[in-house]
Image: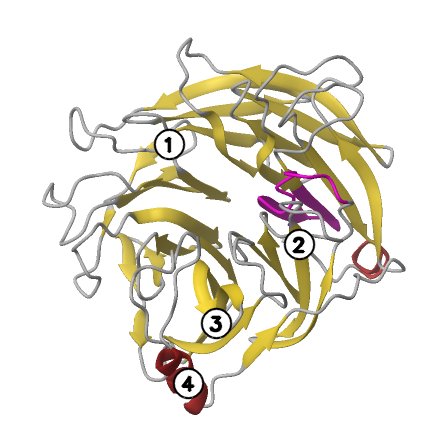
Amino acid sequence: MSSRLAAGCLLSALSLGAPLYQATAAEIDPGRYALDAVLRKNPPGPDAPGDNFGFDVAIDDGWLAIGDIGRRTVTLYSLSEGSWVKQQVIPSPNASNDLFGVTVALSGTRLAVGAAAANGTVYTYSREGSNWQFHSQIVHVPVAGAFNAFGLALKMSGDDLLVGAPGVPAGAGTGPGNGAVYPYHWNGASWAADPPLFTPIDEPASGGVFFGYSVALESGVAAVGQLRGIRPHVYTRGQSGWSADAYSNVGAPTLSGSENFGSEIALSGDVVVVGGPEQQLGSSPGAAYLYQRSNGVWSYQSTVSGDVPDELQQFGSALLLTPDALWVGAPAAARAGVANVGRVIRFERTGTTLGAGADAPSGTEPLGAFGSSLAASGGFLALGAPNYTWVSTPNPRAGAVLLFRDLDELLFGSGFE
């Protein structure tokens, strides 16, 4: 259920000159984006009840990793002669229901998989040729016996790895609120721990902040979201670890902490986008907030919301920034009169200035949760629908991943990174 934001809050944001963008009902350009493949678990054989294939996705250097928390597996595909070929299925090393595959991260020949149940852990793998092999298990117990959820957020970029543990209790050396982020770097042989990042003092501590619920990572810059936050937190890696970037709250929206602001976060260059899927802007639930870095200081620039009064659409639950676009997932949105199909909406962008929004085609599969996970690299977009039901096998929540080609990028090299 979406929360309600006082009308005065919206008016105050708009009166400061911050643009409010909205989606439209148009479809993305089929001349640019072509549906390349619809991937599912073990086609065409039967699926097991409760599969969530596509719960998380990661794509890099011609490889695609798909997490499935129902079967507790990660499936690896590679791009071979223009087609995506399934190469390997990695099962959880643990016999218990550990949420293996809740998060996946890829960078070159390295893979990380989150298994965030209870304390949580992260498994890492390395690739030789087309074979992925177990490398190590990263175990960190911030507070013994606590539901630390280590691995609930996970990102990898080059030799850097970020692990979110939003359940770490407050007062456990974590700052005023609960949650923490644990950075690691590849030292040539293993993942070595860097000093952790804790809840900043300007975040409200009451009711739980869940710092580290989402993370983003790019070229030595990290962005951290929290489930009940009031602003994004951005860090830059230096020789002695990660240090916080400067932030200005001039013109920033007033947030109550009930919008799930920070449940998702995305980063590209000097732009950060933060999801607030429980935000209520007029009759359009859900929002994404855009921030930009100028002269080393991050500040709020604009807001984008959904286009229909769909109270449960969860617009902003998944985010993806590409060089010329912002992609926003609304996995509980209705389409063509069918509830809970899910939507992915693309906005043209120049910096934080957005153009009209347009839908990625998804069909009208009830309860599909299309747009729960998003990833892009090398001219391909992977859009997860972990509750997708396959008609041929009467199994709820088998899951699917829709792959699109960006023909402009493949032809002209404008680039997804």
Q: Image check: 172 left or right of 380?
A: left
Looking at the rendered structure, the kind of residue marked 1 is: Trp
* Residue to which mark 3 is pinned: 281
**From where the camera sits, is residue 398 visible?**
yes
The outermost residue toward the front is 337
Mark with earlier residue (3, 1): 1
First of labels 4, 3 by sequence position: 4
Q: Secondary structure at mark 2?
A: strand
Q: Amino acid at mark 2?
A: Val
Quick one: SS at disc 1?
Answer: strand
Q: Earlier in the sequence, mark 4 or mark 2?
A: 4
Q: Which residue range is magenta in the image?
A: 364-383
Q: Mark 4 Cα within 10 Å, few/some/many (few <14, many 20+)?
A: few
Between the residue at mark 1 and the residue at mark 2, the CA separation in whole angstroms equals 34 Å
Query: Which residue position holds label 4?
Result: 11
Q: Residue at x 59, y 76 (%)?
A: 21
Mark pair 4, 2: CA separation: 27 Å
Q: What amino acid type is highlighted by mark number 4? A: Leu
Q: CA distance from mark 4 to mark 3?
A: 10 Å
Query: Which tag is nearer the camera, tag 3 or tag 2?
Result: 3
Q: Which residue is mark 2?
A: 344
Above or below residue 289? Residue 390 is above
* Residue 302 placement (x, y as % from top left): 50, 77
- Whole-Å distance between the Cαs marked 3 and 2? 19 Å
- Mark 3 touches mark 1? (CB < 8 Å): no
